[in-house]
Image (spheres, grey):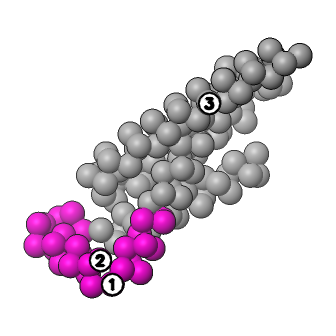
Amino acid sequence: MFKRIMALLIGYFSLYTVVNDIPTSSYDQFMVWVANLIMNPMHFVYSAFLILIGVLAYGIAIKTVITDFRKRRLRSLMVPLLYIALVTCSVYLLYQINELLMLIFLPCSVIYGIISLSQSNVHERRQEGAE
């Protein structure tokens, strides 16, 4: 559980940094930000890296939520429900900061979570066939 929460915190702070950095309130501010990216390529690499880390972390969080409820081997549902509440609250807080960017990042995270879930299902089927 500690690893899950740490991964969620890393993803949250990565996307929090990006969401606060990218202006979406006006077109002029956004174009100034794009010009700064062009003039300072390290800022572009930094922003792209944080977006990637945040989207991957939330995708993994979505995958673990789905797998926890599919396995149902847990003694109690309190831990998965607490984790779902943490994921939902963190997404909601980021959405309140910048709606537009979260409407872009959240579907990317969901798609990554579904893809990684299907890949783990294929891996499990291969393991069963090998035995």
Secondary structure state at the residue bearing disc 2: helix
Report the side of 82 relative to 101 (left or right): right
Quadrant in the picture for the C terminus? top right
Q: Whole-Å distance between the Cαs marked 1 and 3?
A: 37 Å
Of labels 1 and 3, earlier in sequence is 1
Label 1, secondary structure: give it.
loop
Percent x, y of residue 81: 64, 33
Q: Please name the predominant secondary structure of the magenta segment in the image.
A: helix
- Tell me if I can see residue 26 in this picture: yes
Q: Which residues are magenta?
A: 23-50
Q: Residue at position x 74%, y 52% from top?
A: 3
**Quadrant of the frame with the N terminus:** top right
The residue where tag 2 is placed is 37
Query: Relative to 46, does residue 106 appear above or below in the rendering?
Result: above
Which residue position holds label 1? Answer: 40
User: What's the residue type where badge 2 is placed?
Assistant: Leu
Q: Amino acid at mark 1?
A: Asn
Q: Is residue 23 left or right of residue 88?
A: left
- Kind of residue at disc 3: Gln
Q: Quadrant of residue 66?
A: top right
The residues bearing labels 3 and 2 have C-alpha atoms spaced at a distance of 35 Å
Please state which of residues 76 and 30 is positioned toward the viewer in this rendering.
Answer: 30
1 and 2 marks in contact (CB < 8 Å):
yes
Measured from the top left, where is residue 125 in percent x and y? Answer: 73, 18
Q: Position of residue 80 (x, y in %)?
A: 68, 33
Residue at 80%, 22% in the rendered image: 127
Q: Which mark is residue 119?
A: 3
N-terminal of the pair, mark 3 or mark 2, is: 2
Q: Residue 87: image x %, image y %?
A: 55, 44
Query: Going 11% across and 66% down the picture, which residue do you hit?
Result: 27
**Residue 117 sits in which quadrant?**
top right
